[in-house]
Amino acid sequence: MTRAWVFLCLLAHANGLLIAQITPRVTSRAPEQGNVTDETEYAILRGSSYNFLDSAKNYVYLFFNENLQIIDSELSDGEEIQDNTFANRMRFSPYAIYQPNSSSKFSLDLDYSASIRLPRLEKRLRLIIDTGDIAPLPATQPDEEENEPLVGLQRNIRRYGSARLGVKLGLPVVGYAIASWQRNYRADAWHIRPSGDVFYQTDDEGFGTGTNLLFGRWWGRFTGKSSSGIRITEATEGFEWASAIDFMHAARLIEPSDDPPLISSSALNRGLALTYRISGHISGSKTIDEHRVSLTYRYPLRKNWMFLVISPEIRWERDNDWGPDERIRVGIDMLFWGITR
């Protein structure tokens, strides 16, 4: 809850700077994002009355990217190479959860991620900032993962692999290393994506590994996909496993494509996703721990960078004698991927 309020305060501070007529300097290297005309814009906050939101977002985007460029240049003694600094992507998603069956009915938190290039410091090196687990199982919700920020440096290995080394910023600080592999295949209209991870953490989790298999296809604006995965560490009770089936209607994508890959609901500008997930563990025998059904609705709040996300769900858990646990998640998903005009 604290991190979410801190972030909202920072946005308010940025807006205050803009009111004081501080105008961001737009560089030609910054990609354009969210150029939607009034006639085709479906956002709730549309029109010139809300241009100050775009200006605040552009200010934050340019401030971070230009200062990262300076830091990268200083660390590399000013080495001149092709600059991709403004290809950086950041996502901030404050959300609230309402649980009518819980004694503390409301909770507020922040999910965020960033993929930052440091081209001068070392070729193809990325700074990855994220919340959540290392090598999570399919369809894991943000409130089910650990909240400590994960900060690490990642480098691609050949075409399909990557390696990352970093720390989990909690108390105590936990170091981690992970090597990942992922490849996409096509069989007519079907997409198939196997992936695997091997990792080590300096806490009780120790060594671990995880594998996932995702396949599905598109039917016009509709898509169906199935994902299954297993995960084991030194601290888990045997293997953890989960499988999910998703059906999605994509009225519009954030990044349109003539041949879109398999996506999650976070890639929707406007659309609806229905998910069924079953999960459990294997320790001697296969045990089911939870069934879950969720419906996620996304609608643009402002152009192509701020979205309203509403997701009601019902869970049936073995530890709760399979009684229904209802909850609804409401959040705002904000993308800092380029300049909004």
Image: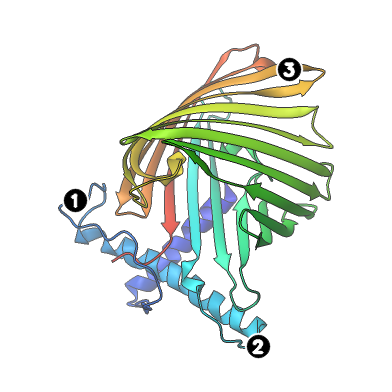
Q: Nearer the viewer, residue 184 or 144?
A: 184
Is 86 on the left or on the right of 113, as rendered?
left
Q: Residues within 10 Å of mark 3 (few under 14, many from 20)?
A: few
Instruction: Report the label total.
Output: 3
The residue that disc 3 covers is: 286
What residue appears at the point 36 percent right and 50 percent down from the top-left corner?
254
Is 196 on the left or on the right of 119, as rendered?
right
The alpha-carbon separation of the residues under discs 2 and 3 comes to 56 Å
What residue appears at the point 49 percent right and 55 percent down from the top-left corner?
91
What residue appears at the point 63 percent right and 28 percent down from the top-left corner?
242
Decide: is 240 above or below 320.
Answer: below
| First along the sequence among labels 2 and 1 | 1
| First along the sequence among labels 2 and 3 | 2
Q: Position of residue 74 (x, y in %)?
A: 63, 84
Q: Nearer the viewer, residue 50 or 159?
A: 159
Write down the quadrant of residue 297 in the picture. top left
- Give yes or no for contact between labels 2 and 1 (Cβ–Cβ under 8 Å): no
Decide: is 317 above or below 212.
Answer: above
The residue that disc 1 covers is: 40
The residue that disc 2 covers is: 77
Q: Amino acid at mark 3?
A: Lys
Q: Amino acid at mark 1?
A: Thr
Q: Nearer the viewer, residue 146 or 227?
A: 227
Judging from the image, what secondary structure is the residue with disc 2 in? loop
Q: Amino acid at mark 2?
A: Asp
| First along the sequence among labels 3 and 1 | 1
